[in-house]
Image: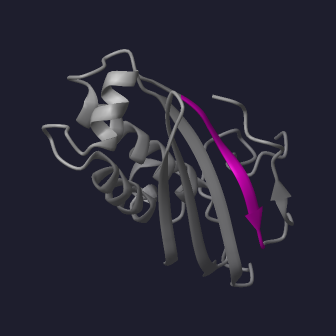
Amino acid sequence: MSGLTHLDDSGSARMVDISAKTATRREAVAEGFIYVGAEALAAIAAQAVKKGDVLATARIAGIMAAKRTADIIPLCHPLPIDAVSVDLTLESGGIRAVAAVITTHGTGVEMEALTAVSAALLTVYDMAKALDRAMRIDGIRLLKKTGGRSGDYSAGAPPAP
């Protein structure tokens, strides 16, 4: 086929065989941003959203999502996660989520970091949608990854919100 790792010789989807790969420390960091109107952002900052503490709930959602990534991404390997952090920062115009995931395994944790960011930002939307239905999630991307056969990766500067 075209050398795509998730396709077999006939073009059918498959899970990549990682059994021969060496277990090494692998880390991935991802980010994303949710644009939030001023009124909703102020309510989130003041912990005045009726559903509860938006940032704390979003952080837990992101951590849980990282651990369950293989359950929602069909060809993703279930991995032993050594550590997950999800940081949410109030910025002008919205909230930035940054997730870092670490494993010692035969494949990387990029999908886990991206899934953590996605779930955290979706949770912000869910909890604050009564205040601002126009919120917009944007800029979800891999910032860096280390470890593994393909080597390290680092993205450029984050886009301005």
Q: Is residue 140 magenta?
A: yes
- Determine whether, in the image, residue 73 is placed left or right of residue 152: left
Q: Nearer the viewer, residue 4 or 63?
A: 63
Q: Quadrant of the C terminus?
A: top right
Q: Position of residue 51 (x, y in %)?
A: 15, 41
* Residues drawn in magenta: 138-147
Q: Position of residue 61 (x, y in %)?
A: 33, 54
Q: Is residue 83 above or below residue 68?
A: below
Q: Quadrant of the N terminus?
A: top right
Q: Nearer the viewer, residue 142 or 35?
A: 35
Residue for point 48% across, 60% down:
86
Q: Position of residue 100 (x, y in %)?
A: 58, 64
Location of residue 46 (image quadrant): top left
Q: Nearer the viewer, residue 15 or 93?
A: 93
| Colour logic | one colour
Q: Residue furthest top?
A: 134
Q: Nearer the viewer, residue 78 or 4?
A: 78
Whether residue 57 is visible: yes
Residue for point 54% across, 64% down:
77
Q: Main secondary structure of the magenta part?
A: strand
Residue for point 73% across, 80% down:
20
Q: Position of residue 73 (x, y in %)?
A: 48, 48
Residue for point 24% across, 45% down:
47
